[in-house]
């Protein structure tokens, strides 16, 4: 008799979600992780100096707090505490002012002057319908919806480009703020569906906030691990899987891996046609990441930036759109959009007393080897003169180092593959059951399946639900 009913490979949010869903259904589940700690994109470490705790990957968690699956777990009882920055995100301009995204939709709109009515007109209806459609929006698209009208209302907006939605706004502030949100999509701002992620991040933010976990993203991983083992799940670390023969017998095998790794590990079990389709899966832009140990808070000129958990550095809509287009076309941007976070402002345990951490990355072409440290620091300095003088130490990851750190980040792509219109639906292949492979009992559950990247666990939840339906 097999010791385990199911084995999950990879302990990212989706690996945990799959393992927990199966274990909660009364099965016996083994979770294997290649590294010496669990967490995938949810790890925190002293990357620079002693006492400075840096989020290696994810930092800010609108999708974590907004995840219908995470909400179903008693993670607070297992040590997870979210902290809400006063300003969720700020977007500074060259004139020293900034637009700000607050949890309150009214407060955000109040700061957008002439665009207040347009902002409220866009987001108020989305905020109202989101609770009816969150599980469906964060799941496979090809299903029969429970609330078709609400889903269509959101979907029709999400099927517009960032540029089309920006046309609703007149002010530099509203257009700039919007561009910083759209650029999370890692596709050009005039690409169809580039609005989808920005609409979700804003709507979820206005409902639940953009919090950071106390102690770092590792706290989410630790809470998931604690809950999983409390219900009888087993975890083994230092188990890098390169062939399926390494795995113990089990009815269900779920892979929190990229399609490329699934092909390497399970290749001969998969049909030729499935392999061919998986081979056409497309990876997107990479990232260049910097973590800083700082002697003091970042001296941003704009007050909203000094209070924000997240700061989007890119100036105007046009500048952000240009840099994202250049990167998409395989070039490095001179003034790239930089996603910056300053967790220690709200979580003092991240750095020694009075000192701070900085977390930031810019997009680069997939597989880029270029050192973007100076370029990123110039973008921070542009909106926070004196920033360079506060740097005590820094740590960087280029795309290869990202990929080595986590084999799922192919060429530095942190989203598990491009999220354009094609791969929003064909993720990883066009199918009514996208988590299923061609081999009975083998499933994919990573961010390369619907709904895609982010720390929410919804890919893992839906993959495990499919396995339960098929096999148990
Ligand atoms: C720099 C950066 C910033 C980010 N910022 C945010 C953010 O602020 N908010 C947010 O929500 N998301 C953010 N993300 C994205 C988020 O981290 C990912 O989308 C998410 O972690 C994907 O989850 P996953 O479970 O699919 O895979 P992962 O989290 O990548 O986990 C996969 C796990 O599987 C393991 N593994 C892979 N292959 C094998 C193998 N063959 N054998 C054994 N183990 C294996 C890996 O070691 C890893 O632990 C960021 C990512 C990065 C890199």
Image: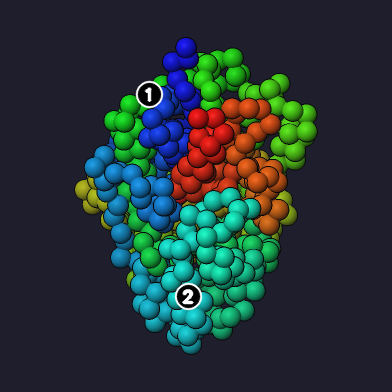
Give the residue at x 38% y 35%: 24
Can residue 135 be seen in the rendering of this structure?
A: yes
User: For the residue labelled by badge 1, is the local secondary structure a helix, a strand or a loop?
Assistant: strand
Q: For the point 59% across and 56% down, which residue is it?
A: 144
Give the labeled residue for mark 1.
Answer: 234
Q: Residue at x 67, y 55 (%)?
A: 420
- In the rendered image, residue 408, in percent from the top left (x then y), is placed at 57, 36
Q: Earlier in the sequence, mark 2 or mark 1?
A: 2
In the image, residue 397 lies at what x, y percent?
A: 52, 40
**Residue drawn 46% across and 83% down?**
116
Q: Judge left or right: residue 246 versus residue 27.
A: right
* Residue 125 coordinates in the image, percent (x, y): 47, 75
Residue 211 in which image quadrant: bottom left
The crowding category of the residue bearing disc 2, from other C-alpha atoms within 10 Å (few below 14, some 14 to 19, many at least 20), is some
Q: Nearer the viewer, residue 198 or 305?
A: 198
Q: Is residue 444 above or below residue 316?
A: above
Which residue corresponds to mark 2?
A: 125
| Left or right placement of residue 252 versus residue 124 in this view | right
| Secondary structure at numbered mark 2 | helix
């Amino acid at each position: 008799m097999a010791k385990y009913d199911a084995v999950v490979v990879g302990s990212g949010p989706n690996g945990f979600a799959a393992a927990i869903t199966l274990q909660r259904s009364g099965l016996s589940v083994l979770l294997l992780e290649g590294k010496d700690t669990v967490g995938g994109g949810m790890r925190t470490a002293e990357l620079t100096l002693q006492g400075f705790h840096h989020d290696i990957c994810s930092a800010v968690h609108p999708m974590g707090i907004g995840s219908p699956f995470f909400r179903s777990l008693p993670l607070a009882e297992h040590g997870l505490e979210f902290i809400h920055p006063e300003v969720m995100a700020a977007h500074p301009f060259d004139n020293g002012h900034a637009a700000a995204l607050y949890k309150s939709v009214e407060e955000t709109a109040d700061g957008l002057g002439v665009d207040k009515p347009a902002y409220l007109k866009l987001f108020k209806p989305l905020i109202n319908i989101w609770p009816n459609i969150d599980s469906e929006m964060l799941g496979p698209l090809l299903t029969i919806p429970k609330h078709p009208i609400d889903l269509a209302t959101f979907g029709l907006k999400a099927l517009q480009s960032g540029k089309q939605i920006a046309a609703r706004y007149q002010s530099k502030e509203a257009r700039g703020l919007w561009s910083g949100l759209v650029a999370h999509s890692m596709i050009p701002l005039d690409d169809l569906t580039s609005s989808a992620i920005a609409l979700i991040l804003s709507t979820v933010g206005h409902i639940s906030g953009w919090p950071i976990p106390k102690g770092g993203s590792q706290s989410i991983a630790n809470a998931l691990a604690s809950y999983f083992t409390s219900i009888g799940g087993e975890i083994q670390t230092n188990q890098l899987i390169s062939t399926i023969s390494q795995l113990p017998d089990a009815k269900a095998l779920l892979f929190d891996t990229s399609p490329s790794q699934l092909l390497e590990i399970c290749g001969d079990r998969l049909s030729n046609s499935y392999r061919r389709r998986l081979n056409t899966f497309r990876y997107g832009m990479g990232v260049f990441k910097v973590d800083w140990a700082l002697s003091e808070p970042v001296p941003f000129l704009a007050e909203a930036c000094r209070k924000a958990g997240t700061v989007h550095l890119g100036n105007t809509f046009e500048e952000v759109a240009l840099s994202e287009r250049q990167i998409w076309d395989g070039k490095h941007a001179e003034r790239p959009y930089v996603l910056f976070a300053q967790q220690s402002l709200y979580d003092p345990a991240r750095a020694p007393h009075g000192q701070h951490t900085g977390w930031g990355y810019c997009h680069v072409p997939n597989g880029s080897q270029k050192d973007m440290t100076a370029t990123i620091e110039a973008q921070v300095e542009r909106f926070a003169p004196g920033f360079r003088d506060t740097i005590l130490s820094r740590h960087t990851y280029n795309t290869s180092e990202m990929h080595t750190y986590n084999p799922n980040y192919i060429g530095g792509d942190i989203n598990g593959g491009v999220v354009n219109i094609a791969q929003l639906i064909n993720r990883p292949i066009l199918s009514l059951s996208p988590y299923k492979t061609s081999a009975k009992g083998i499933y994919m559950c990573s961010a390369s399946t619907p709904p895609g990247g982010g720390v929410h666990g919804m890919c893992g939840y839906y993959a495990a639900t499919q396995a339960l339906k098929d096999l148990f």
